[in-house]
Image (cartoon, rainbow, N blue to C red):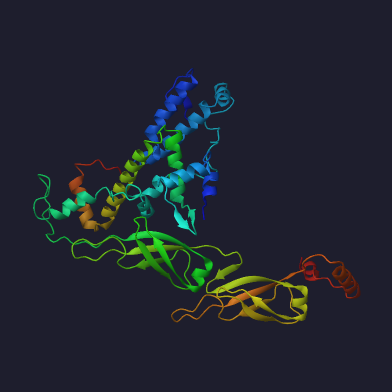
Amino acid sequence: MSKNPYETLGVKKDATAAQIKSAYLKLAKQHHPDLNPGDKKAEERFKMINAANDLLGDTEKRARFDRGEIDASGQERPPQPSHERKFYRGFAEGAQGGRYRGAGPGGADTEAFHDIFADLFRNQGQGGPFPGGTGAQARDFRMRGADQRYQLSVSFIEAALGASRRLTLPDGRTLDVTVPPGLESGQVLRLRGQGDPGIGSSPAGDALIEVDIMPHPYFRREGDDIHLDLPVTAAEAALGAKIAVPTPAGPVTMSIPRHSDTGKQLRLRGRGILARGDRPAGDLYVTLKIVLGVPDAALEEALKTFYERHPIDPRQHLVETS
Amino acid sequence: MITLHRVCQEVPGLTEEVLLHWLAQDWVRPEQQGGEPNFREIDVARVRLIRELHTELEVDEPTLPLVLSLLDQLYAARRQLRLVLETLDPPVRESLAETLRPLIAVEY
């Protein structure tokens, strides 16, 4: 990328700002990668053109370059985000590009080869629509419909307990999707026969739904188990208590034993991911976290007196092992 | 989840008002989640492309839908051609390549 920016834009060293802009626009239109999906090198050329324009389009930078203070590659590209830019063409040819098929709202399905394929299938055994074409194979053409891919985001709770969701497809159809309990992120659900219709007497394709699970503010999942950090007061931990604990399926009452401390882990059996098939339900692991709450003079006084009488060093083992 | 607000942060110079207008025109079609648009990477890349077409490549607003429609058809055609080629069994593929070689200059 260290080519001379004047050469890149094809302008003379004394070109005016207007000439540079005009040269840049012409080249950018010609080489934009998204307008040249078949040309692998377009992206590199487009980046070079942009880099050259960033340098020469800025009077101050151009002057510094001309004086030899900076070289052609010594520039950062200011308007781009810090990570490598991903062009549209990188997505448009994948399954997700199907979202942008057709001509907009209510528009006809303009899948570009649809008519050509229709001709192909109609002309089976008749020599094809074009002189010299063969087209003599497979008189009764049959082809299974194509699979269609969709993406669906579900909440943590929906993935844990299972749910049913209605998906509205880009073409306006709706699909009812049953999310089984215990679903994992990235898992693909297959809805048979919900893809594109088949040709001839062949079955329709499938709808493949890739599910993305959104993180939960306080539940974490590990396999079939769920973990939760549970804030408790010092009194609840020291004296024991019965408290309500949130679980994916709703709150349940749990006993905290006397003399508990921060970090103590308690298990609520069967309160994790719901059972399905022959897999038993996972457990909910609750880790206690003692919270002192609002400052209070009486509590401060009590703590002070207590620790003066019963000095302890909770960090003793850290010192010993260091 | 990529919200409207975040797209505008990622694409320099883009305002929420303009982006909402593009959604209303159906130029960008993010999923809806709880009544809010949830953008995927493809949608963000498309927003960036539309912005570039408009601001740098001098495509004015009345012409934009035409350019987008042609691009969408181009990508649909490429997607379908790719799918067709992926469906072919290796022997069919080879024989097709033999037949087409004189007609198309294929880059490897």
Name the residue: 49% across, 57% down.
Answer: B35
Please identify the residue farthest to the top as the structure is shown: A14
Question: Left or right of A168: which side holds A283?
Answer: right
Name the residue: 51% across, 43% down.
Answer: B17
**Up/down of B47 relative to A149, above or below:** above
How far across and how far down the image is residue B15, in percent? 53, 41
**Up/down of A5 relative to A291, above or below:** above
Question: Left or right of B106: which side holds B19?
Answer: right
How far across and how far down the image is residue B22, in percent? 44, 44
How far across and how far down the image is residue A182, in percent? 48, 72
Q: Choose between B18 and A81: the one closer to the eye.
A: B18
How far across and how far down the image is residue B28, in percent? 42, 47
Question: Left or right of B38: which side holds A259?
Answer: right
Among the 4 quarters of the image, the one containing residue A240: bottom right
Name the residue: 19% across, 41% down.
Answer: B103
**Up/down of A101 relative to A274, above or below:** above
Q: Quadrant of the C terminus of chain B?
A: top left
Q: Choose between B25 and B31: the one closer to the eye.
A: B25
Q: Is residue A85 visible?
A: no
Question: Left or right of A312: which side holds A175?
Answer: left
Q: Choose between A58 and B10: the one closer to the eye.
A: B10
Q: Choose between A271 and A85: the one closer to the eye.
A: A271
Q: Is residue B65 visible?
A: yes
**Up/down of A135 relative to A311, above or below:** above
> What is the tally of numbered marks visible in this picture?
0
